[in-house]
Amino acid sequence: MKDQLKAILDEAMERIENATQSDDLNEIKVAFLGKKGKLTSVLKSMKDVSADQRPIIGQMVNDTRVQLEEKLEEKKKVFERQELEAKIAAETIDVTLPAKKPKMGHRHPNSIAREEVERIFTGMGYEVVEGPEIEYDYYNFEALNIPANHPAKDEQDTFYINSDILLRTQTSSVQVHEMEKGRIPIRMIAPGRVFRSDEVDATHSPSFHQIEGLVIDKDVTFADLKGTLDVFAKELFGEDTKVKFRPHHFPFTEPSAEMDVSCFKCKGKGCRFCKGSGWIEILGCGMVHPRVLEMRGIDPEEYTGFAFGVGLERIALLKYEIDDMRLLYENDTRFLEQF
């Protein structure tokens, strides 16, 4: 039995010494220490050894196992060190090479325009307020004096989730939420994304952005509205910009108006940009309808206010002389880097 164990040990040591890779070690371990391995077979034959010799032979088997396991572990560490050295050599980094610069994004024309509008109005004491894009029909229409079956609903051709919930068509709903808080005076603008079922073309998109403003306080008049929007236009398009108000109709304001600005391209003389008129339509506005105030629990005899709304994309298109709204959504860095 002793000679047999020595022969097994010598054979195993020789195979370990001649191994060239980690997989060879696994094969050797299975051949000698596995369930059907040579050393395991010796252990199984211990029942044939006399009782007085059994402890001696058992100790010899264990010593042989320990030597095999130590040699296997030693050789394994040699292979691991070799593999690590090869990996380090293959992955050497030349720190003298110039670094690869990550490609940076660019601020979007819409973001630039929005920040500029926010800067103008916060400078006049307005608060920037945001609200949910998924809105109740009540806040989007009824609270703005647009009851069921009103023609204005058809004009906006809305995306409905169910009969009571929709994707908002205007950020005016944020104004309703703000009035509902009952904190007067109110001076706010509400920028955000809105949704209407429009066909995509050079001037329309089913998803776009609006900035709506609201002021409610005592003794607010249409003159305050005109003065505020005149300052806004001059800050946005230049000090020599003139404004013009044309009568219009909005369900939630009375009286209502559309505001035009003098063409900043031709200074009002008439050009291709303003279609020869010298004026460019920019936004809608008006005095808050008394019924809208009443529905929010605000006494129209004590408080008055004005509201206005402008399309953010319209500002970006005009300010940067972009002739196709679709360019704003294509995420082409060659286009965006111009701004």
Image: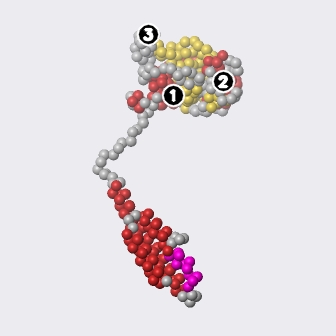
Image location of residue 318, percent across then percent down: 45, 21
Q: Is residue 213 left or right of residue 5?
A: right
Q: Which mark is residue 276?
A: 3
Look at 38% across and 28% down and name the residue there: 338
Task: Name the residue at the left extreme.
Answer: 96
Magenta stretch: includes residue 41:
yes
Q: Find residue 79 and report its horizontal and vertical position in percent.
A: 39, 65
The image's mark for residue 141 is: 2
Bin the neighbour count of mark 1 within 10 Å (Cα to Cα): few under 14, some 14-19, many 20 and up: many
Cα–Cα gap, marks 1 and 2:
26 Å
Residue at disc 3, secondary structure: loop
User: Which sits earlier in the primary sequence, circle 1 or circle 3?
Assistant: 1
For the C terminus, the image quarter is: top left
- Which residue has dot 1 on it? 121
Viewer-closest of 330 and 108: 330
**Which amino acid does the dot numbered 2 rest on?**
Phe
User: Residue at horizontal 59%, vertical 24%?
Assistant: 196
Which of the two discs, 1 and 2, sits closer to the camera?
2
How are the residues colored?
secondary structure
Give the number of the mark in front: 1 or 3. 3
Above or below residue 72? Residue 269 is above
Q: Principal SS element in the magenta part?
A: helix
Residue 199 spot, x, y in % from top left? 55, 21
Q: Is residue 102 left or right of residue 113?
A: left
Q: Quadrant of residue 266?
A: top left
Whole-number angstrom distance, CA of label 3 to CA of label 2: 36 Å
N-terminal label among 3 and 2: 2
Question: SS at mark 2?
Answer: loop
On whether residue 312 falls in the magenta region, the answer is no
The magenta span reads 39-49
